[in-house]
Image: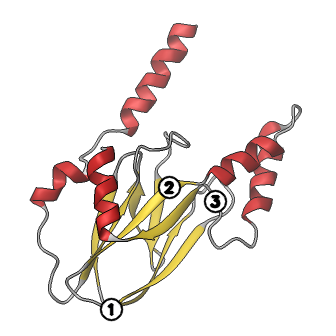
Amino acid sequence: MKQMFFLSLMLVISGCTSGPTYKDSFSKMTAVPHNRARITLFRTTESNLFIARKAPIELDGVKIGGVGYGGFISKDIDIGDHVLRSELWDSPGSCEVAFRIEVPGKEYFFEVAPRAEANNAFQQGATIFFPIITGMAALAEESRNNPCGGLFAIMPMPRNKAQAKLFDSQ
């Protein structure tokens, strides 16, 4: 039984880290179009929280993909005001970040990171009798009235700091 559990765990973990890394894809990326900007959302391998979950990402209410453990997504977008959002269907709370793109031809970076506060709220709220229900209730309370609640945070990051993280951690 232990062997089956370990084998299943390894299968899940190995599936989470598949896909190209930013480091591997960097040299193949095209230039940012002169009349648009590029956003890159990334998740490092610094934290093992929610390792088996991808953070679903919406841009202006439209799903653009999911950022997995050690993964990234890039998208060219128009100049102007935008909103990024991450919300999982089976977990209360969401993180929403409004931002403005003013400079065409530039790349903007956002780190998507597991929220330790969400994990702590779930664990502290879980009781011995109904752990899932009470843990979710605690997570919902922690995320209530929080513009960046839920399991994942989205944080803008300067290019040099983002690329250092992307090249060093993958």
**Tag 1 residue:** 102
Q: Residues within 10 Å of mark 1 (few under 14, many from 20)?
A: few
Badge 2 vs badge 3, beta-carbon distance below 8 Å: no
Badge 2 vs badge 1, beta-carbon distance below 8 Å: no
Q: Residue at x 46, y 59 (%)?
A: 112
Q: CA distance from mark 2 to mark 3?
A: 11 Å
Q: Earlier in the sequence, mark 2 or mark 3?
A: 2
SS under mark 2: strand
Please identify, in this view, whether the residue under mark 3 or under mark 1 is nearer the observer: 1
Q: Measuring from the top left, give residue 29's x and y in whole percent.
A: 14, 63
Q: Residues within 10 Å of mark 3 (few under 14, many from 20)?
A: many
Which amino acid is tagged 3? Gly
The residue most toward the right is 129
**Tag 3 residue:** 150
Position above or below: 135 against 141: above
Left or right: 74 in relation to 26? right
In the picture, which quadrant includes the N terminus? top right
Q: CA distance from mark 2 to mark 1?
A: 25 Å
Q: Residue at x 67, y 52 (%)?
A: 118
**Tag 2 residue:** 113
Which amino acid is tagged 1? Glu
Q: Measuring from the top left, give residue 79's x and y in whole percent.
A: 31, 90
Q: Earlier in the sequence, mark 2 or mark 1?
A: 1
Q: Measuring from the top left, give residue 163's x and y in whole percent.
A: 28, 60
